Amino acid sequence: MRQFLFSILLLFAVSSIQAQSGTSYSKIMAAFEQWKTSSIQKGKYASAANCKMEIVTKDGYKGPNTGIPQDLSIHFADINGDGKLDGLFTFHPQQCDGGNAMMNAQDRVLVLSKGTTYTTDATYISNIEQKKEGWFTVTGALEGMIFGTYNEYGPEDGRCCPSIRKPFTIDYKTKKLEMEK
């Protein structure tokens, strides 16, 4: 009987933890969708319906030339160190005119817990990145750290292929960038 009660209690505890995690994931996804909708409304990105060559190449078109693709990379971890799950969304902006000038571009959106809600920050990583000559390709996040590859063109490199590539980490709290020499 004791084992049965213990099993029921354990099952309830595991279900409760899973429900809390599921709620966090849902809140993170909802916060990103709100950011996405707001960014489109503000004119930073074209909507999926307007991100088409025949629209953005028309004479007089003054809207955005990039859109947010369906293909996103999403990483979940406690990035801000408050013990709650956060999200990091990365994507390559969709070039609406069909070109490839942005082949190395990557946008990143942090979705960070703040009490019982979530806030978004699409500038944190870019603000650190702009202090460098090259650019970051963010590949993930783990407990307080954001990581990926730093890319930079050498003097003889073609646009496709930067020869300088180094792993990097950013400590979220201190904004300290560490990179191989």
Image (tube, grey):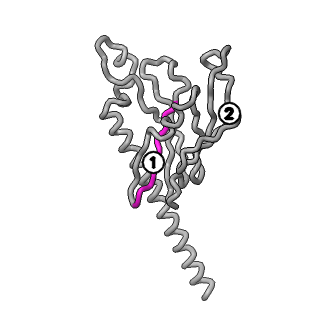
Dot label at residue 111 = 1
Q: Position of residue 117 (x, y in %)?
A: 38, 56
**N-terminal-most mark, 2 or 1:** 1
Image quadrant for the C terminus?
top right
Depth check: give the residue in front, 54 or 180.
180
Answer whether residue 71 is visible to the viewer in this image.
no
Q: Residue at x 41, y 46 (%)?
A: 120
Give the CA distance from mark 2 to mark 1. Answer: 26 Å
Identified by mark 1, the residue type is Val
Q: Residue at x 44, y 39 (%)?
A: 122
Residue 31 appears left or right of 108:
left
Q: Position of residue 39 (x, y in %)?
A: 35, 36
Identified by mark 2, the residue type is Lys
**Quadrant position of residue 67:** top left
Mark 2 surroundings: few (<14), some (14-19) or many (≥20) residues within 10 A: some
Dot label at residue 166 = 2
Residue 167 appears left or right of 11:
right
Image quadrant for the N terminus?
bottom right
Q: Residue at x 50, y 59 (%)?
A: 82
**Quadrant position of residue 153:** top right
The stretch of residues the image draws in magenta is 106-115
Q: Position of residue 146 (x, y in %)?
A: 58, 45
Q: Position of residue 46 (x, y in %)?
A: 36, 28
